[in-house]
Image (spheres, rainbow, N blue to C red):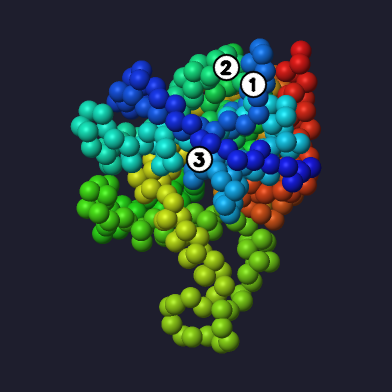
């Protein structure tokens, strides 16, 4: 179970890499930065390091607070900290903001060293493979030859899986949570509708909105509202809001009448205040392109034949965006390839967002698995 303990006040670090990074699309970043946070202490043989990979709108701020005045802790504070499932008294935990992000790592908001201007729309599309390559450079910088575990939910789980395929000798355990070996057609469709909301916003200006001193806030807001609906389950949404009205009786107009409308608009407005539209486009494209089996004749079992990591896979009963059936595909492929895998399907009413929540069975399962990871570190 989680505890009330916290990693406390944490300070992000920006790590510079002056080595050019060749990307899958044929382009090269001449240099790049990765914004990270670390928690816990790296042991003498550097065998207790855990990498946390974030989902679409996540970042490096996984746990703790940046100041005593911060209202909210990191996005996975219930999972990472002293005595928590990913125990910072046992593990050295690294969180990072991926390339293309908008929280300090090199992305559309960064200066292009070749032009001296902000990248904006010129920042290249990146893939999960590109992220793994940049993350391996980070591991080298930190002196970590092999991760005790790589952990991620949703898009983060895809990164954990890709690590085991791209660099099998550098991962001991992979925790793939609420994820999939590739997006479904429906998921690609959802992403395209979200992108179209941004791309058709009059303030988008072909991605160069900041040079026009504006933001495609309407499109980004709609994209987030639609995405947020898909992350939730009808059970949870219905129990929280039902058909409750903001005031007595219908207003017979198109303003906010239902409580759920108010909630979604609030979430959309809050997102516009903290996230970059070009980054949103990049992250959804990375999701769409992820398909490790495509390099192996579209045979998922073949794609994992050379992995050396042990796996923990978790799904959630009401997650219709990344349904349990998608986790089953990965588990079956791993078993067929004779790999070690533990699987849990958690009954939850939180939908896809359940991987961020505190469903007891889920928290206990992660804690139990990470306890085994820790034992492996001691061997």
The answer to which of marks 1 and 2 sits earlier in the sequence is 1
Kindly identify which residue carries mark 3. Answer: 59
Nearer to us of marks 3 and 1 is 1
Nearer to us of marks 1 and 2 is 1
Q: Element type at marker 3?
A: loop
**Up/down of 131 relative to 237, above or below:** above
Residue 83 in view here: yes
Work out which quarter of the rendered image holds the C terminus and state it.
top right
* Among the 4 quarters of the image, the one containing residue 25: top left
Kindly identify which residue carries mark 1. Answer: 42
Q: Element type at marker 1?
A: loop
Q: Are marks 1 and 2 in contact (CB under 8 Å)?
A: yes
* Among the 4 quarters of the image, the one containing residue 330: top right
Residue 181 in view here: no
Kindly identify which residue carries mark 2. Answer: 144
In this orientation, which residue lies closer to the viewer: 21 or 327?
Answer: 21
At horizontal 26% and vertical 59% (from top left) the residue drawn is: 202
**Up/down of 147 relative to 106, above or below:** above
Q: Residue 158, which numbered label?
A: none
Marks 3/1: CA–CA distance: 21 Å
Work out which quarter of the rendered image holds the N terminus and state it.
top right
Callout 3: few (<14), some (14-19), or many (20+) C-alpha neighbours within 10 Å? many
At horizontal 56% and vertical 79% (from top left) the residue drawn is: 246
The answer to which of marks 3 and 1 sits earlier in the sequence is 1
The answer to which of marks 3 and 2 sits earlier in the sequence is 3
């Amino acid at each position: 179970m989680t505890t009330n303990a916290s990693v406390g006040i944490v300070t992000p670090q920006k790590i510079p890499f002056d080595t050019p990074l060749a990307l899958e699309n044929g382009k090269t970043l001449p240099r790049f930065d990765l914004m990270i946070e670390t928690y816990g202490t790296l042991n003498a043989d550097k065998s207790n390091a855990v990498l946390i990979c974030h989902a679409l709108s996540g970042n490096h701020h996984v746990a703790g607070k940046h100041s005593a005045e911060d209202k909210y802790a990191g996005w996975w504070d219930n999972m990472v900290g002293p005595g928590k499932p990913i125990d910072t008294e046992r593990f050295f935990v690294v969180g990072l903001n991926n390339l293309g992000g908008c929280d300090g790592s090199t992305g559309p908001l960064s200066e292009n060293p070749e032009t001296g201007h902000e990248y904006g729309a010129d920042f290249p599309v990146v893939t999960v493979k590109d992220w793994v390559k940049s993350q391996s450079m980070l591991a080298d910088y930190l002196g970590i030859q092999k991760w005790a575990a790589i952990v991620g939910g949703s898009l983060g789980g895809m990164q954990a899986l890709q690590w085991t395929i791209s660099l099998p000798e550098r991962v001991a355990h992979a925790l793939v949570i609420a994820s999939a070996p590739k997006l479904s057609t429906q998921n690609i469709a959802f992403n395209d509708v979200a992108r179209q909301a941004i791309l058709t916003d009059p303030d988008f200006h072909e991605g160069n909105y900041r040079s026009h001193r504006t933001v495609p806030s309407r499109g980004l807001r709609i994209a987030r509202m639609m995405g947020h609906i898909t992350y939730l389950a009808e059970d949870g949404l219905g129990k929280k809001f039902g058909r409750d009205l903001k005031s007595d009786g219908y207003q017979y107009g198109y303003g906010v009448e239902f409580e759920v409308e108010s909630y979604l608009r609030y979430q959309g407005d809050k997102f516009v205040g903290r996230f970059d539209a070009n980054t949103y486009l990049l992250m959804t494209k990375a999701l769409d392109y992820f398909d490790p089996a495509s390099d192996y004749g579209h045979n998922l079992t073949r794609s994992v034949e050379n992995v050396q990591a042990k796996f923990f896979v978790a799904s959630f009963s009401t997650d219709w965006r990344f349904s349990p059936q998608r986790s089953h595909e990965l588990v079956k492929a791993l078993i067929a390839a004779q790999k070690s895998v533990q699987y849990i399907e958690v009954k939850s009413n939180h939908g896809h967002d359940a991987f961020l929540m505190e469903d007891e069975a889920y928290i206990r399962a992660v804690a139990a698995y990470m306890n085994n990871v820790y034992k492996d570190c001691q061997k």
